[in-house]
C-alpha cells in the first residue's frame, strides 16, 4: 500500500471516528442527564433547556465553521479547534459544579459538534460524485454504530463510585470524563493521520484553478501607481480577462471564489429550499417520536428502563443495517429514488402508526394484550427506523452534488442548522401532545405528505441541475 493511499484511508477512518464519538456521546450522556442535572435541583423545564441548548449551539456555530472552512480550507486547524471545545465541555460536565455549569457544558459540546458539516464538505470536495452516496452512507452509519455501543458503555460505568480529589466519580458524572478522554485521543489521531486533500490540490495548482483555468495574478482592487500607456493597457487587458473568466465560470454554475451572493443565489433556488425543508421536517418528525415514545410507553405499555433500553438497542441495530443496505443499494439506484423511498416509507409508517394508536389497550408485557401491543409498537417503529437512512443518505448526497464546491462548508453548516432547528422544535411539539397521540401523528403525516408533493413538483429541476 502506497503512503498516499494509506493517508487517504486513515483520513476517512478518522472522519468516521469523529461521527462515531458523536453517537457514543449522545447515547452515554442523554440517558443520565436528567438524573445528573436534577441532583443539582434542576426542574423539568431546565432539563428541556439543557437538551435543546446543544442543538442551539450547533445551529449557531455550524455556518460559522463552514464559512471559515470555505475561506481557508484549513480542515485540520478548524476540526482540532472544535474538538478542543468537545474536550473542554465534557470536562466541565464531569466537574458538575451546578446545574448552570452542566448547561454551559452542553452548549460548549454543541460548539465542538458543529464541525461535523466540515467533514461532509471535505468528502464532497474529494470523493468522485459517483461514489459519494456509498461513502456518505458508511460515514453516517458510524454515528448509528456509536448509538448502538454507547448504552453498553453506560452498563460498564454504572458501578463507579469514588473520589478523585474533590470530584465525585459516579455513573452520572463519569460520562463527561470518559468522553473527554475519547475526544483527546481523536484530537491526536486527527493531528497525526489526517491530510486535507482539498488544500493540497488547491496549493499544487498555483497557476491553475481546479478547472484548469489559468490564474491571473492581477491587482483588481486598485490601479498602478505609475501610469504609462503600455502599463495601463496591460492592466486593463488582464483585468478584463479576469472578469471574463469569473463570468464564464459563474454562467456554468461553478464559482471561482466564495461570496455570500453565491450562497444566496444557490440556496434560494427551488431545489435547495426543498432539501432544507425536507431536512427540517424529517428531523422534526424523528425527534417528536423519540421524545413521545418514552413517557407514552411508560404510561400505556408500562415499560420500565430495561424495556426502553432494549428498544433503543434494537432500533440502533436496525438503523445500522439499513445504512449498510443503502450503501449497497446506492450502486444501482439514484440518489433521488433513495430519498423518495425514504420519504414514502416514512409516510406509510405514520399512516400505520395512526391506525395503531386507537387499538392500544394499556397492558403490561406478559399479558395477551401487552404482547400484542409490543408487536404493534416494534413493527411500526421498525418501519420508521428502516426508511430514515434512505432519506438521509439520498438527500445529503444530492445536496453535496448540487452545491458549488466553493461554498460547501457554509452550505453544509446551514443545512445542519435546519437539522438542529428540527431537533429543537420536535421535542417541544411532542412534549405537549403526549396525551394526544392522534393529534401529533396527524400533524407528522401531513408534514410528510406536503414535502412529498414538493419533491415531485421539483423532480425535473433536481434532474436538470443534477445533470449539470
Image (spheres, grey):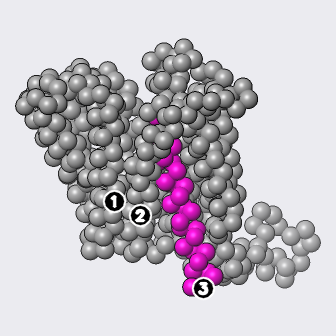
Which disc is residue 138 wearing?
2
Q: Secondary structure at mark 1?
A: helix
- Left or right side of 404 for 293: left
Give the extent of the magenta segment. 1-30
Which disc is residue 32 wearing?
none
Q: Is 73 inside the magenta-drawn segment?
A: no
In 3D space, how far apart are the residues under numbered discs 1 and 3 (Cα atoms)?
A: 30 Å
> Is there a contact, CB below 8 Å, between mark 2 and mark 1?
yes
Q: Tell me what residue is drawn at x 39 percent, y 49 percent.
A: 148
Q: Tell me what residue is drawn at x 41 percent, y 54 percent.
A: 145
Q: Counting other residues with Cα less than 10 Å from the Cα at mark 2, is it few (<14), some (14-19), or many (20 or more)?
A: many
Residue that label 1 marks: 323
- The first of marks 1 and 3 along the sequence is 3
In 3D space, how far apart are the residues under numbered discs 3 and 2 (Cα atoms)?
A: 23 Å
On the image, the x and y values in percent for residue 149 come to 43, 49
Residue that label 3 marks: 2
Say which of 412 and 13 sits in front: 13
Amino acid at each position: 500500500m502506497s503512503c498516499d493511499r494509506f493517508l487517504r484511508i486513515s483520513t476517512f477512518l478518522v472522519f468516521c471516528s469523529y461521527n462515531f464519538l458523536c453517537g457514543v456521546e449522545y447515547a452515554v450522556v442523554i440517558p443520565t442527564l436528567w438524573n445528573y442535572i436534577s441532583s443539582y435541583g434542576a426542574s423539568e423545564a431546565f432539563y428541556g433547556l439543557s437538551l435543546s441548548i446543544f442543538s442551539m449551539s450547533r445551529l449557531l456555530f455550524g455556518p460559522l465553521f463552514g464559512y471559515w472552512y470555505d475561506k481557508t480550507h484549513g480542515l485540520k486547524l478548524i476540526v482540532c479547534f472544535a474538538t478542543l471545545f468537545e474536550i473542554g465541555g465534557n470536562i466541565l460536565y464531569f466537574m458538575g459544579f451546578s446545574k448552570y455549569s452542566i448547561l454551559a457544558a452542553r452548549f460548549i459540546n454543541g460548539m465542538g459538534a458543529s464541525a461535523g458539516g466540515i467533514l461532509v464538505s471535505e468528502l464532497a470536495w474529494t470523493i468522485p460524485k459517483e461514489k459519494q452516496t456509498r461513502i456518505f452512507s458508511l460515514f453516517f452509519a458510524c454515528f448509528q454504530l456509536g448509538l448502538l455501543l454507547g448504552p453498553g458503555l453506560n452498563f460498564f460505568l454504572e458501578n463507579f463510585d469514588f473520589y478523585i480529589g474533590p470530584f465525585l466519580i459516579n455513573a452520572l458524572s463519569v460520562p463527561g470524563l470518559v468522553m473527554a478522554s475519547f475526544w483527546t485521543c481523536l484530537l491526536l489521531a486527527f493531528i497525526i493521520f489526517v491530510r486535507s486533500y482539498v488544500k493540497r490540490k488547491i496549493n499544487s495548482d498555483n497557476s491553475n484553478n481546479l478547472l484548469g483555468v489559468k490564474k491571473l495574478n492581477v491587482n483588481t482592487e486598485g490601479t498602478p501607481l505609475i501610469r504609462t500607456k503600455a502599463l495601463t493597457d496591460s492592466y486593463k487587458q488582464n483585468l478584463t480577462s479576469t472578469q471574463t473568466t469569473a463570468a464564464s465560470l459563474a454562467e456554468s454554475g461553478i464559482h471561482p471564489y466564495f461570496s455570500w451572493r453565491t450562497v444566496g443565489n444557490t440556496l434560494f433556488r427551488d431545489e435547495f429550499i426543498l432539501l432544507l425543508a425536507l431536512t427540517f421536517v424529517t428531523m422534526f418528525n424523528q425527534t417528536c417520536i423519540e421524545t413521545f415514545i418514552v413517557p407514552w410507553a411508560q404510561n400505556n405499555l408500562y415499560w420500565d428502563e430495561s424495556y426502553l433500553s432494549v428498544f433503543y438497542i434494537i432500533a440502533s441495530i436496525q438503523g445500522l443495517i439499513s445504512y449498510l443496505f443503502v450503501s449497497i443499494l446506492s450502486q444501482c439506484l439514484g440518489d433521488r429514488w433513495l430519498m423518495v423511498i425514504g420519504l414514502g416509507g416514512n409516510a406509510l409508517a405514520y399512516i400505520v402508526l395512526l391506525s395503531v394508536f386507537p387499538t392500544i389497550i394499556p397492558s403490561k408485557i406478559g399479558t395477551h394484550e401487552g404482547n400484542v401491543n409490543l408487536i404493534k409498537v416494534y413493527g411500526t417503529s421498525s418501519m420508521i427506523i428502516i426508511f430514515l437512512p434512505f432519506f438521509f443518505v439520498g438527500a445529503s448526497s444530492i445536496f453535496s452534488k448540487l452545491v458549488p464546491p466553493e461554498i460547501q462548508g457554509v452550505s453544509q453548516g446551514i443545512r445542519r442548522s435546519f437539522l438542529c432547528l428540527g431537533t429543537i422544535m420536535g421535542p417541544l411539539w411532542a412534549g405537549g401532545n403526549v396525551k394526544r397521540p392522534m393529534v401529533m401523528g396527524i400533524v407528522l403525516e401531513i408534514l410528510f405528505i406536503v414535502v412529498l408533493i414538493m419533491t415531485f413538483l421539483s423532480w425535473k429541476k433536481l434532474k436538470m441541475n443534477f445533470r449539470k
